[in-house]
Image: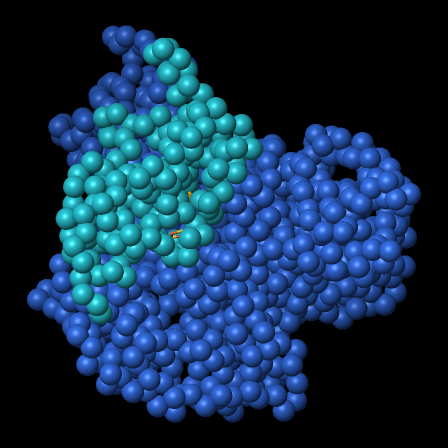
Chain colours: A blue, B cyan
Amino acid sequence: MNDLSPDRDDRIANLKGLGCSRKRVEDARFTQGKGNYVDDIKMPGMLHGDFVRSPYAHARVVSINIDAAMALDGVVAVLTAKDLEPLGLHWMPTLAGDKQMVLADGKVLFQGQEVAYVVARDRYVAADAVELVEVDYEELPVIVDPFKALEPGATVLREDLEGQTSGAHGERRHPNHIFLWEEGDKAATEAVLDEAEVVAEETIYYHRTHPCPLETCGCVASMDKVNGKLTLYGTFQAPHVVRTVASLLSGIEEHNIRVVSPDIGGGFGNKVGVYPGYVCSIVASIVTGKPVKWVEDRMENLMATAFARDYWMKGRISATKEGKITGLHCHVTADHGAFDACADPTKFPAGFFHICTGSYDIPVAYVGVDGVYTNKAPGGVAYRCSFRVTEAAYFIERMIEVLAQELNMDAAELRRINFIRKDQFPYHSALGWEYDSGDYHTAWDKALTAVNYDGLRAEQAERVEAFKRGETRKLMGIGLSFFTEIVGAGPVKNCDILGMGMFDSCEIRIHPTGSATARLGTISQGQGHATTFAQILASEIGISADSITIEEGDTDTAPYGLGTYGSRSTPVAGAATALAGRKIRAKAQMIAAYLLEVHDNDVEFDVDRFVVKGAPERFKTMKEIAYAAYNQAIPGLEPGLEAVSYYDPPNMTYPFGAYICVMDLDVDTGQTEIRQVYALDDCGTRINPMVIEGQVHGGLTEAYAIAMGQEIAYDEMGNCKTGTLMDFFLPTAVETPHYTTDFTETPSPHHPIGAKGVGESPNVGGVPMFSNAVHDAFRAFGLRQSHMPHDHWRIWRIAEGLGLHG
Amino acid sequence: MSKKMQITLTVNGETQELLAEPRELLIYVLRERLNITGPHVGCETSHCGACTVTMDGKSVKSCTVFAAQANGAEITTIEGIGSPDSLHVLQNAFREHHGLQCGFCTPGMITRATKLLEDNPNPTEEDVRFGMAGNLCRCTGYQNIVKSVLAAATELSAAKEAAE
Ligand code: FES
Ligand code: FES
């Protein structure tokens, strides 16, 4: 007979499982300065790598002279394309089916491109040697405008592809054209638009920007020639993929490569790609037999690794006079820079941009995306979003506002009458997605009520009148946004990266005394996986989260996984974790039944134990069961208590949300002040509300930065004008608005615990919210579209253009 | 390369003597010679504050101070602010109020905040936002950092009052 205390509620609380705001286990080391980031790694004899980079955006490399650099004391090697060529490593494949120069092979195609790689005793000597490498360039005409790149007779940028009329994604109709990717019914969409009662047309530019995590990218490569093992530490959002790529490129077998992602200082998509620095460091370590560290500086980070966006989106949307949307047509000119290195699932060269019908029931739609080469940095990563979803959300949320203007309707009401209704889920969109679940009307009404939307509109109308009377120089904008994200890539049948299906995995070991270790194929960059995945598991297996260690990021120990980006960790690895937990529970049930001398079906799981049905005083706790798994011979069962699960999601998940902000904007200075931000997120089942709120704050701040000032800008010569944090806007605590968060909870029907992922929603929904607020402030004066980022100067220019400066 | 200089630093209470080139930055001397890796490098241009340390009673960005300039100085880094057995109030507050995510900015943030609260034990939210504006965070959106600092301020002043 067992003691029934502590009572059930205490037992649930002790678990620290799903739904509780458990404090983070990561924080102890971070708050004491004991994180272990890549630049903290030090190995005996370690050398430092640094790049000679091109000052030109387009030029022939006539000659490279390394003599002076090699003569410098402390310099060990200087690698150029010539050294890499015999190994076949002067070019490398990109994630998008293109190839990219590792070191300049005859020419350079963007400013900051890697030309030579110096290896030296320390970072100071390496930097000195970089200065001593003499490169002779012959400048070539530069193209920074994707429309000009496609003009007949335009300078051919990628001479290596000359004569190739098709690429990884079909036909190339111009030497600077990469692909045309289409989805939807073009003819039917055009027919609807031709007949429509109302059509709104607008070109919307989502400018080039950069994820800019506080820690830049870097690695330490260490080739152990005695054992034939390569160890690679680095800022990798997908360590297993890096191992596979490293193996394919180097010829070293995968079991002889260990890739470790240590603590990562933010990723936001920047750390998904494979960069020349990794390849050169590996080669340098193989050549020298010493560990080689490479960490890019901030300028290199902004200029050379992983830009995001740069989409010119031309839209047409049609509706009835009453505002019911009837069709959507979109053509995108996508500037991919010098190499197509976009980080998208292989079959989706424009990512999931075709979620661009948004949260609306649009009967027919078409999108076409033209990818174009220019003399800009390669990248095209999903900066805190799931593969071009933020571009899609921005597009549709601007088009809705433009249509509202065309119809002379309230934009909140226009959204409401076009939302996909709750009873329409699972909903098949005109562009081929199956939205798993949603309740948009409830979320929208909750949001509008929370901010007192009608009151705000009345105040705004008064403000416009006061402005017209000359009593104020400040206008007021109400920024609306309702977004649907698509995350959790993805079903292996249509989502892969370099041929690796986008599943994820979890392996659990329960130890004899009742604690556990779980390993995953993902890697946290601040999301707090060590905290939240333990919570998922605690609820599944009845062991307190405090007794569960989560390990990630070491390919020698973790099961194969596709990594963390695109909000896929919770939807995919989170599911794998739950399912591995259920395997543990299934075996635990048999053990419990044996110990309690009843049939398997006569016991049931209850919080942290198995109980004989109808006899709650007869039970075995998970702790007892774990011990029994290792110390008793149980007939018909193998000893031990371990499980592994690989999860291939049946569908994506579709988090959504309703965001509203209020902005005051000074017409004469262009300055803005965000008075209020309300963000309602529905990410399905909530694992840790504290962590969710933190993610929302962070994502909103990145959205604020992007909408209001952050950009990667080039002049006509292809000079990057935003290579330092002086020019590249990262908001401080002073400008950053205050946020109010809220939620509804619509669980995903196909996810084992109903969770959908949240990290990227606030960026996806936040950018249109802030941008719409600026547009809305000027709506009364006829502004239709003004491109981001809305910095003070650009806002001043809007006012000037509308004649508001008198 | 120029001649090395003899430099003496007192870091977290320990005197360190070392030879450094005049151009060597304090952050690299701390991180690479003394293995004090709490302060991080985010920009090397004085913008991000990840490298913040306290030097002779002032918050400084150690990426833009030459080690030679720090000769003779008293330096406190995150490693000298609390110990595993007795964490600083701010270290607890950041955990309690979820004032960090990836943790890369955190050592600089907490180091800066110790100084801020020393100078202004009862700050308003605006004081904190302004006083922390030299430290960038890409993850948290600052709201919980501000909350953490304000909570620590309240706790510290309560403790001080109780002691008086
Ligand atoms: S590294 Fe010193 S301020 Fe950024
Ligand atoms: S917690 Fe990541 S930069 Fe601040």
Q: Is residue A466 visible?
A: yes
Q: How many marks?
A: 0
Q: Is residue A23 above or below residue A414?
A: above
Q: Is residue A747 above or below residue A283?
A: above
Residue A388 x/y as whole percent: 57, 59
**Front one among B53 and A630:** B53
Residue name at image x 86 percent, y 37 percent: A462
Q: Is residue A488 left or right of residue A588?
A: right
Q: Quadrant of the N terminus of chain A?
A: top left
Residue A772 x/y as whole percent: 72, 50
Q: Is residue A176 left or right of residue A267?
A: right
Residue name at image x 20 percent, y 74 percent: A75
Residue name at image x 66 percent, y 78 percent: A147
Q: Is residue A200 left or right of residue A597?
A: right
Q: Quadrant of the C terminus of chain A?
A: bottom right
**Front one among A778 and B110:** B110
Q: In this view, which residue lies farthest toward the left?
A: A226
Residue A336 x/y as whole percent: 54, 72
Rendered image quadrant of residue A606: top left
Q: Is residue A119 above or below residue A430?
A: below
Residue A365 x/y as whole percent: 72, 62
